[in-house]
Image: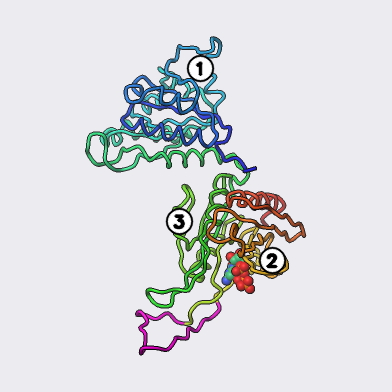
Amino acid sequence: MSRPGVFYQKRIVLGVTGGIAAYKAATVCSRLVQAGAWVDVVMTEAAQKFISPLTFQALTHRPVYTDMFHIPDGNNIPHIVLADSSDLLIIAPATANTIGKMANGLADNLLTAIAMATPAPILLAPAMETDMWQHPATQSNITKLREWGVEVVGPAAGRLASGAMGQGRLVEPDEIVGAAQMVLARQGDLAGKHVVVSAGGTREAIDPVRFVSNHSSGKMGYAIAEAARDRGARVTLVTSAVLSAPFGVEVVQVDSAREMLAAVLEATEQAEALVMSAAVADFRPMSVAEQKIKKKGDSGGMVLELVRNPDILAEVAARKSSGSGPQVTVGFAAETEDLLANAQSKLERKKLDLIAANDVTATDAGFAVDTNRVTLLRIDGSVEELPLMTKRDVADAILDQVVQLLATRTRA
Ligand code: CTP
């Protein structure tokens, strides 16, 4: 069974206030419900002028709260129940008015009462005209709320309801969901840890337009980066793949093995763990032509002389033995034959704590697909053979081991 994501069975109160962007809250709501959260929507009176409670009721299959004094089940006082039972309060869009009330201790409607009463983290996604956003009152209210621990995402710059351009647009639903994910992930088992992940096949230039590379898509590394983020880690993704960056993950884009080496060494200086899922080219052209190489004559081939690239894991291991670098290093063994024997020898040779052995000849596992089948070999001799899984689930299985390994290490 798939490991549930951060939103699974989380109780989220989604507060919607009165702005033209209120319709985007429906997308946020739908994403959260699809991710397995129980979402209770609370709307201010002004919000209902822009979007109907029925929309949210249909999306959540739950009553929508609009009135402080309406007690639906006859007993429980809504603002207390919602405040106490929720894991997260998101207010999107948050108007200048609601922000102002929150920053000044006013609780004159159900939403602001919940905001005052809840011990849960609060995430605000402001949306308003630029002048209102830049007004000293709003700026000082936001500063005050931030000091109190409220998280703020956005606003973005762009076209506003008035037609003017400027800062004040509600950030896109994906960004709100991503920010919510980060807030919830703080309770994860990698909270407070810095994890560096490498991804993609490196590209070794031949000339300004050509390169030598391999079939790695980077999907496995991106899945690990995302999973580590969802478990609360600060994540640096050193990648040669060009996939869309997971929200909240620091991305360092590289091309060649030597660039990846420099980026990995820098990123792991203070990191707790390194997962090298990149398919690093072992060789690079001896020299890179400054101009595009031209064919000579009508026939005849071309000889490309290759030289060895540095082994990134070997360099990390060398630093580790002198007391710096990550406490836990994980490698991948992409093999086409003798899978476990080759993986075991790489585990030892590269001084890893864990290696994920990966038969890249299978059509449903390895390069460019969304599933993978790996066997995890640990330096202490334990072997875990995993069935065919999504790359995300493989990522979590690897991180389960990283968490265990980190628990056994203490930095000198
Ligand atoms: N790796 C590395 N630096 C390299 C080559 C590989 O850090 N120059 C890392 C990979 O990211 C992976 C592990 O080493 O985590 C094993 O990579 P793989 O390509 O399977 O093995 P190689 O060391 O290249 O050995 P071989 O080519 O002999 O299979």
Q: Going by the image, does 157 lie left or right of 406?
A: left
Q: Please give the residue where the numbered disc 1 appears in the rendered image.
A: 78
Q: Please give the residue where the numbered disc 3 appears in the rendered image.
A: 243
CA neighbours of label 3 inside 10 A, class few (<14), some (14 to 19), many (20+): few
Image point (72%, 59%), residue name: 378
Label 2 residue SS: helix
The x, y position of residue 191, in whole percent, is: 59, 45
Is the CB atom of the residue marked by disc 3 within 8 angstroms of ligand 1's nearest atom?
no
**In which quarter of the view is residue 334 placed?**
bottom right
| Distance of label 2 from label 1 (alpha carbons) | 58 Å
Q: For the residues carrying marks 2 and 1, which lies nearer the camera in this image?
A: 2
The stretch of residues the image draws in magenta is 287-308
Observer able to see residue 315: no
- Of labels 2 and 1, earlier in sequence is 1
Q: Please give the residue where the numbered disc 2 appears in the rendered image.
A: 339
> Which quadrant: the C terminus?
bottom right
Q: For the residues carrying marks 3 and 1, which lies nearer the camera in this image?
A: 3
The x, y position of residue 51, in whole percent, is: 35, 25
Do the residues under discs 3 and 1 have CB atoms within 8 angstroms?
Answer: no
Give the quarter the ligand 1 occupies.
Answer: bottom right
The x, y position of residue 106, in whole percent, is: 41, 20
> Which quadrant: the N terminus?
top right
Label 1 residue SS: helix
Q: Is residue 264 magenta?
A: no
What amino acid is labelled 1 in the image? Pro
- Of labels 3 and 1, earlier in sequence is 1
What amino acid is labelled 2 in the image? Leu
The x, y position of residue 289, in whole percent, is: 39, 81
Magenta region, mostly helix, strand or loop? loop
- Of labels 2 and 3, earlier in sequence is 3
Furthest residue in direction right, as rendered: 381
